Image (cartoon, rainbow, N blue to C red):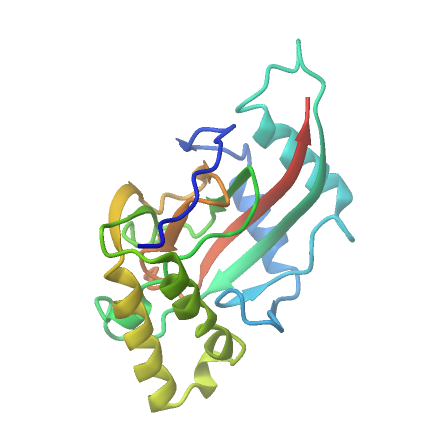
């Protein structure tokens, strides 16, 4: 059976509450930006452009603050490279039924990143719209899992309001088939202004796109290179 490769972990999975000093100002900033669907269909919902392009001060400030969770700047000088930082908005596939499995995110990896994560930024969100770290079970086959993951692309490239009944049925089957290969390891609840970190090789999912609000807002980051 095709098992996933083991990768060294340089950063621990962790959660920190009350991350931003003024989170409502961050939300206001996020809502002032433009969002668009990803052209390649790798992720659901909409994202801003990479924030280093036009908001370098915020980009540097966030990364400095976030990496202080891992490094003591009294003793370490830190630099980073090839970092993706975006605000992301997702919404429920079925806004009327919180428990519809269509509202569950697809289990996936983010790629070869030593450190990734997100900040929850929806005030008063449904607590169950957080994130879970998943572990492959005895049924897991890496090749099969990659084939399943490739099927999401055609669905995520479409606006949700343009998905047909067949599209939604296909997505439901994809979620169910993928879920068979995993067991839940760690659950992070969606708490306003909470940051969570893990690695790009950790399998994970959004537990629900149903946040109880119009949209589920997060700040997501993917760091390819860190030097100390």
Residue at the location (31% across, 68% down)?
Answer: 175
Measured as percent of width and height from the top left, residue 222 is found at 59, 46
Q: Nearer the viewer, residue 41 or 211?
A: 41
Q: Nearer the viewer, residue 188 or 204?
A: 204
Residue at the location (69% across, 60% down)?
Answer: 49
- Residue 151's image quarter? bottom left
Q: Which residue, as the protein is rendered here, is positioned at the far front?
A: 1
Measured as percent of width and height from the top left, residue 185 is found at 27, 42
Measured as percent of width and height from the top left, residue 46 is found at 55, 67
- Please determine whether, in this image, residue 69 is positioned above or below residue 209: above
- Residue 88's image quarter? bottom right
| Relative horizontal placement of residue 13, taking residue 136 as reference (left or right) | right
| Relative horizontal placement of residue 57, taking residue 101 as reference (left or right) | right
Residue at the location (48% across, 40% down)?
Answer: 199
- Please determine whether, in this image, residue 9 is positioned above or below residue 82: above
How many discs appear? Answer: 0
Q: Which residue, as the protein is rendered here, is positioned at the far top?
A: 75
Q: Is residue 94 visible?
A: no
- Please determine whether, in this image, residue 222 is positioned above or below residue 228: below
Q: Nearer the viewer, residue 152 or 22?
A: 152
Quadrant in which the N terminus appears: bottom left
| Relative horizontal placement of residue 40, taking residue 152 as reference (left or right) | right
Q: Is residue 65 visible?
A: yes
Q: Nearer the viewer, residue 36 or 21?
A: 36
Quadrant in which the C terminus appears: top right
Residue at the location (60% across, 69% down)?
Answer: 38
Measured as percent of width and height from the top left, residue 167 is found at 38, 85
């Amino acid at each position: 059976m095709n098992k996933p490769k083991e990768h060294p972990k340089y950063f621990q999975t962790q959660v920190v509450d009350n991350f931003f000093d003024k989170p409502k100002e961050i939300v206001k900033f996020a809502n002032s930006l433009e969002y668009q669907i990803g052209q390649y269909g790798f992720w659901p919902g909409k994202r801003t452009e990479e924030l280093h392009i036009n908001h370098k001060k915020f980009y540097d400030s966030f990364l400095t603050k976030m990496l202080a969770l891992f490094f003591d700047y009294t003793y370490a000088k830190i630099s980073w490279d090839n970092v993706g930082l975006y605000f992301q908005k997702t919404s429920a596939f079925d806004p009327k039924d919180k428990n519809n499995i269509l509202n569950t995110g697809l289990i996936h990896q983010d790629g070869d990143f030593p450190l990734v994560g997100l900040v929850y930024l929806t005030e008063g969100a449904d607590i169950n719209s957080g994130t879970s770290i998943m572990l492959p079970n005895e049924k897991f086959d890496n090749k099969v899992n990659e084939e399943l993951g490739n099927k999401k692309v055609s669905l995520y490239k479409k606006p949700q309001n343009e998905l047909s009944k067949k599209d939604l049925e296909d997505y439901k089957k994809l979620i169910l088939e993928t879920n068979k290969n995993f067991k839940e390891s760690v659950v992070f609840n969606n708490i306003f202004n909470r940051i969570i970190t893990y690695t790009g090789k950790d399998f994970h999912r959004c537990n629900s796109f149903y946040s109880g609000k119009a949209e589920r807002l997060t700040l997501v980051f993917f760091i390819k290179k860190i030097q100390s």
